[in-house]
Amino acid sequence: MTGALTLAPWIPVVPFAAFLIALFVGHLAPRTLPRDGGLVGVAATAISLVLSAWAFLTVSGGTTGLETVWNWVPAGAGPFGLTFGVLVDPLSALMVCIVSGVSFLVHVFSLGYMNDEGEPGLARYYAGLGLFTASMLAFALSSTLVEAFVFFELVGFCSWWLIAHWFREPGPASAAKKAFLVTRFGDYFLLVGVVGVLGTFGTAAFAGPNSFPAAARAAIAGTTNANTFGFGAETWVTALCLLVLGGVIGKSAQFPLQTWLPDAMEGPTPVSALIHAATMVAAGVYLVARIYGLFALSPQAMAVVALVGGFTALFAATMGTVKREIKQVLAYSTISQYGYIMLGLGSGGYVAAVFHLLSHATFKALLFLGAGAVIIAMHHDEDMWKMGGLKSRMPVVYWAFLSGALALAGIVPFAGFWSKDAVLYRALTVGLGGQPLVLFAYAMGLVAVFVTGFYTFRMVFLTFHGEPRSEEAASVDGTRANMRYPVAILGVGAAVVGFANVDSLRSYVGSNALYLERWLNGGLPGVSGGTADYYGGLVRSVAGFHAASFDPLVSAGVSLVFALCGVGLAWAWYNVPDPSERTDVLGAAKTLLYNNYYQDEFQTWLAQGVAEPLARGVDVFDGSVIDGVVDGVSSVSLSGSGRIRRIQTGVVTTYAEQLVVGLVVLLVVVLLLGRWF
Amino acid sequence: MVPLQYYLVLSGAVFCIGVFGVLARRNAIVFLMSVELMLNAANLVFVASSAQYGTIAGQTFSLFTMALAAAEVAVGIGIVLVLYRNFEGVDVTIANAMRD
């Protein structure tokens, strides 16, 4: 690690120090902690943000770094070495900037959302935020899959901690448990995948000449032999990808493990912003982007990723159309948008997916913080049907929120338009290039654009437009500065971030203006792999995903028309002084959507109707058969030994008798066998 | 010269007397004496065979046996003394506490 990158390990260490300070000082001497640890957290994330920006600038100068920090198991000591290191390349430098930036704004916002409202347990809250940020930064900078797995789990633990902040109420406590257990379920597959990668390639390194994506490519090309446990190399790599995908589906809330995320809205709103924009949910798709060199080798795994993404995008969006609470709408939009990122990754659009990750982080953090400001103004009433008319009373929040909503709906020229369209264009061209599954996923994603436009602006119109529909809405106060500024900053971001990669206008502006694509083409010096071009080559030559030629402006126009139709429908139905619930026209389907397709009920039935009777049966078998055999053996030996112990009289004559009898018997046997008689 | 079979029969008889003593008598002193009888029955066979075959190995073994018997008596008398002190008698059937 050279130059400024020697400071890179400090990026996660500083928030970790803030965690320790908030935890121990907050416990031992809470009065000495300024603003209950809030200022420590703000300072730590500010330092992290500066260090991240410095790393970003260093990387943009062409310097990247890969360094081992700790040798857990040295490479020579066993079949494989386990190391913890720091990998600073364009992808991780971009990610740490997103994470520390969002985390910094969330910390500032928390001063207004939590401290000024006099919430209890703030030291615990800020300790959780610090550890959450530290874990995610360390995850983003991980240089091996094992290290990434450790921090992946820590991220899951921290989300449990923070969702359960108001743990004395039953809702948050059970939501936190659900989030932890559902994501853990996916992580079992990831753990098996990690072990599989180690067992197959003998290394878990992400980058460098001895990395496992490089080894996998060599194994598929047939130039080296890997231990594929008797399967063909392609089959086995696909299996490993799907195992890792299990963890990704859990963390990134993709179908069918997305049920934890709407419940996680029980946590404080700044935590929701952090979870959705930068940390927990982003960890899943970031992991796929990190090991894209492995996924790009397997067309089957890519198709599964694309299908899961496209289906989730549509599936979650439909549920968002009928929700009453503002945060519920945002939760389903998060699931849906991460579906787009998965669709982009699955169709080979590495740059498009990372771009959507960046723009989504910006506008979703904005929407959640804006929703937080609205919720504070409404005295923690989240029902949109009691809002209305907030536009004139909180103008800064309104305009920023509108910017985020336009970005989410994908209206030109806001961030979400460029990135979502890049994803859809990529999926369309690959689908037309001979991948019908990807084309199907694209179709679902395109329909979801219409639904997204509708539910986004239903939310905006119900919240901010029309007349106030309750006393709280009629008498809200202005938003305080520590909540207003983060929202305003992100509002500007959501409007301009899209210009980082105006992919739809590629033929007009030239590829030099596609800053993100150029950025992601910087890899580690002296090492092939890890650049966007390298991944593109793998997708074409190994996975066999060829892009058909198609006019990007037509694709962009089609998705824009879909989005505008959705917005227009929301305008017609809800931008009126006295809106009514027009989604009642859906009839029974609305009930289905409102109850999330009864997935929670289905999963509860799986647990209570299938798993529990099965467990009971096993328990009965264990109690009767297994325990019966064990008890039988013990009672037979007990009673038998009770009888046999009677020959032990303790009288020496008895033992002499036994000796003699034994000797005589032995003699007789030997003589008989020796045929001496 | 007396044939070897006679010595063997005599030795067997002495050995059986010793076994009988061990099994049937309760006095610890008699117990010890019976053990001596068995040992000397073995000695008798050693010496007789040695004389019969003109080798010296049997006589050598009988010397070892005598030394063994002396050591055994020393230990045995010690045990008898302890028995007497603890149970005020030398009846071997009284001491059965090591059963447990």
Image (spheres, helix red, strand yellow):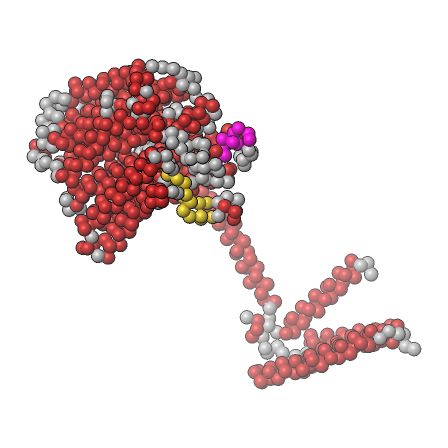
**Where residue B71 appears, x then y in whole percent?**
69, 80
- Magenta residues, start to end: A215-223
Residue A261 lies left or right of residue A654; in this view the side is left
Residue A462 is covered by the magenta coloring: no
Residue at image coords 39%, 43%: A1
Q: Residue furthest right?
A: B1
Q: Position of residue A610 (x, y in %)?
A: 39, 36
Residue A170, picture quadrant: top left
Q: In the depicted view, which residue is nearer to us: A620 or B61?
A: B61
The correct choice, above or below, for A382 with respect to A458 in the image is: below
User: Which residue is located at x 18 percent, y 43 percent?
Assistant: A111
Magenta span main SS = helix
Q: Is residue A492 left or right of residue A340?
A: left
Residue A662 in view of the camera: yes
- The total of numbered circles placed on residues is 0
Q: Does the segment drawn in magenta span residue A220?
A: yes
Give the vertical position of A246 relative to A618 (above or below): above
Q: Which quadrant of the structure image shows residue A369?
A: top left
Q: Residue at x 67, y 82 (%)?
A: B74
- List x then y, in percent, for residue A19: 28, 49
Q: Please state if A425 lies on the left or on the right of A194 as rendered.
A: left
Estimate the x, y position of residue A455 in percent, counting from the top left. 22, 25
Residue at 28% over, 21% down: A449
Which residue is at the front of the view, A513 or A172? A513
Q: In the visual, does A239 lie left or right of B74?
A: left
Up-down relation of residue A673 to residue A439 (above or below): below
Q: Quadrant of the C terminus of chain A?
A: bottom right
Residue A424 visible within the image: no
Name the image quarter holding residue A346.
Answer: top left
